[in-house]
Amino acid sequence: MKNNQTLLGIDIGTSKVAAVIIDTQRQLHAVSSKAHQAQRKARPGHDEQDADILLSAAYSAICELPPTLRAKVQAVGITGQMHGVVVLDENIQPVTPLITWEDARCLQGDFLEQLCHRTGHNIKSGFGSATIAWLVANDLLPASAKACATIHDLLAAKLCGLDKPVIDPTDAASWGLFDLQTLNWDFDAAKTAGLPIDILPELVLCGSKVGRVCGDIAERLGLANGVPVAAAIGDNQASILAALEDPEHELVLTLGTGGQLSAVLPAGHKPDHLEHDSKYEYRPFPDSRYVVVAAALCGGFAWEWLSCTTKKWLEELNFIPPPTETLYKKFNDLGLRAKKSVEVHPHFLGERYDTSLTGSISGINLNNFDLGTLSRGLARGIIENLKGMLPDYSFKDRNRIIGSGNALRLNRLLQVMAEVVFNLPLSLCQLQEEAACGAALNAVSLILQ
């Protein structure tokens, strides 16, 4: 392979869209990132985003990259928020919003518990298969439904002019009702759950070519006609691809809105059966490997909670709160100077393995509940929560942590607490917008085809 061939990576995230241009030597040449503001007003417990706004934001992010670089792109990789699902008609037009990973409608009554019992699968709130099953059970699946997809699989289909989206194992597994041993849908379980089998996307291999950017889209985006597009990959796996240099000896800690701690398993390692209350997941990974992942609902969001709460208290006291950036700097400074901390369990949104969990603070006395001890305790609690969710064998032979995600990158206190909790050195991934970069790198093999 020639040096410095150019790749485009796109990430449709929970709150923003990013696009990057990176070369095959992992040199980042351009970044575009913007909030997409696709959130819809929805009923309590529902979390929805406008799929058309998300796609439009992705196109806009691409078009903000330098045109001379876009014209040189030789392969496209795509990623985005996992678990969520959008239902499509026969023309692959959305007939529902994107129902995101934060959606909790399946927690109404005992629906999710009964779904897990009937299918034998460890399905969590916000998983695409659970969402579709809920729509079916409540007679809310549109009559025009002919397909369904993650938002990033839909983008891949749009770029290539596909008749129906396809999905790779990293995304399919994030929906549930997936057989990790065969890397295919568990069709029997899907039927038991009430899913219309014909709307499930076809499985394709990680990193495989799903098509080429078609003429009108290529012209609109300033790309060469016929550039190959790789199957979209889950954002967790994409971030890991961008971060890791030595997969079997490193851990990846990602703090964005949520939080993930990931360990790629040795080649040939097959996942064990998971109990329904397991705190971790096995996920498919490129090159026919698996990664074991702890995913907390509150990662960077827990850190944001401290800022929002402080602002609220100041406003209630009739003070004008300082800018958010000033507060974060103060939390870091005070927390780094604090010698001790209170104990914080940041389960502010519950956890997928136990939705009844709530946040708590303990170890408070008359003299230690100040912003420094609270900041330090919260930072440590975010890291300890993730570490405690992974099985012990995940830490064997690991010699460092690779950090990614803006919450970790921008807060020195969280970095220090990661080194304290794991007793390992932390190195921050040098690539910006890691998920988008990892998606691009997932498309490297297409240049050889």
Image (spheres, helix red, strand yellow):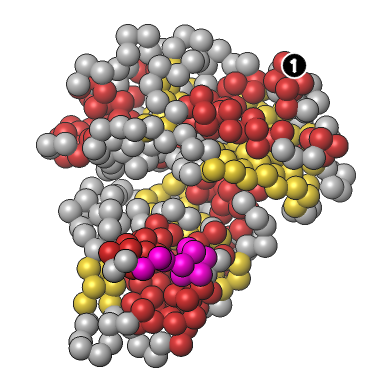
Residue to which mark 1 is pinned = 215
Q: Is residue 27 left or right of residue 94?
A: right
Q: Secondary structure at mark 1?
A: helix
Q: Is residue 410 left or right of residue 393?
A: right
- Residue at the image position 12 percent from the left and 37 percent from the top: 110
Q: Taking the image as drawn, is residue 265 in sight?
A: no
Residue 158, located in which quarter of the rendered image?
Answer: top right
Residue 77, located in which quarter of the rendered image?
Answer: top right
Q: Position of residue 439 (x, y in %)?
A: 62, 43
Q: 329 or 386: nearer the eye?
A: 329
- Residue at the image position 49 percent from the left and 64 percent from the top: 323
Q: 199 or 434: nearer the eye?
A: 434
Q: Position of residue 227 (x, y in %)?
A: 76, 27
Compared to 93, does 349 lie above or below?
below
Compared to 387, does 165 lie above or below?
above
Q: 208 or 224: nearer the eye?
A: 224
Quarter occupied by the N terminus: top right
Q: Taking the image as drawn, is residue 425 in sight?
A: yes
Q: Is residue 333 left or right of residue 67?
A: left
Compared to 435, does 51 lie above or below?
above
Q: Residues within 10 Å of mark 1 (few under 14, many from 20)?
A: some
Q: Amino acid at mark 1?
A: Gly
- Residue at the image position 40 percent from the left and 72 percent from the top: 379
Q: Position of residue 162 (x, y in %)?
A: 59, 16
Q: Is residue 406 magenta?
A: no
Q: 314 or 223: nearer the eye?
A: 314
Q: Position of residue 313 (x, y in %)?
A: 30, 67
Magenta residues span 319-328
- Residue at the image position 22 percent from the left and 53 percent from the top: 354
Quarter occupied by the C terminus: top right
Farthest front residue in view: 318
Farthest left residue in view: 109
